[in-house]
Image (cartoon, grey):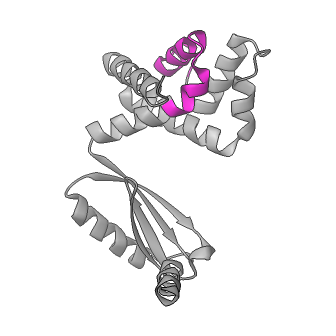
Amino acid sequence: MNDGLIPNRYAKALFKLSKECGDTAEVYNEMKRLDLAYAFEAGLKKAVNNPFLPLNDKLKLLCAASGSQQGGTSSKFMELVIKNNRIDFLRAIALAFMKQYRELNGIAKVEVVTATTMGDDEMNAIIDVVKEQLGGKTIELSKRVDPDLIGGFTVDVDSRVLDASVKSQLEKLRLKLLS
């Protein structure tokens, strides 16, 4: 079965459930925390995929990682995912849910990566240009410093990248010289 099909179907179900319960924004924040927990704690995936760990302990671990309350919408949903043996899809489900939530609420995910820490004036200028291009969408901004860029910045808006870094310009020049 297609790996994208299962997460998308479960994400739609979670979206529908959270909408019925009236806590879609809360579930969105919990799915963001769950995604971050998977990203920064490699042991989480190993623990929840461990067949010797009792299901109740897996649920407690996932609730702690997402910040959700036991008995809440996210907790009930994660319990269903565990019982249906779809736990290895949980992060993909969370990502699909967040994508659906952002699309339906007019939110653009924007990541600005700079070579050095950028001042507020420069960062605000970049954000203003992005807001103008997005035409009224709300921005969910994340900033990161990557010294490998050498200079300049990159802006990633919903997986579309504007690359104004010295690193990419040097790479283009190198390729031009080789050809």
What range is drawn magenta here?
69-92
Residue 23 location in percent, x, y? Answer: 38, 24
Please name the residue shown 55% across and 64% down the image. 144
Q: Is residue 170 above or below residue 81?
A: below
| Magenta stretch: dominant secondary structure | helix
Please name the residue shown 62% across and 75% down the image. 147
Question: Taking 102 as reference, is 6 left or right?
Answer: right
Residue 62 location in percent, x, y? Answer: 63, 25
Please name the residue shown 69% across and 12% down the image. 55
Q: Is residue 12 above or below residue 113?
A: above
Question: Taking 163 as reference, is 89 left or right?
Answer: right
Please name the residue shown 63% across and 44% down the image. 39
Residue 91 location in percent, x, y? Answer: 55, 33
Q: In this view, which residue lies farthest toward the left?
A: 135
Q: Does residue 84 belong to the magenta stretch?
A: yes
Q: In this view, which residue lies farthest toward the front?
A: 179
From where the camera sits, is residue 30 visible?
no
Q: Does residue 95 belong to the magenta stretch?
A: no
From where the camera sits, is residue 172 visible?
yes
Q: Is residue 22 above or below residue 172?
A: above
Say how many tags the image has: 0
Q: Quadrant of residue 122?
A: bottom left
Q: Quadrant of residue 89?
A: top right
Residue 44 location in percent, x, y? Answer: 70, 33
Q: In this view, which residue lies farthest toward the right?
A: 52
Q: Is residue 44 above or below residue 116?
A: above
Q: In this view, which residue lies farthest toward the bottom?
A: 177
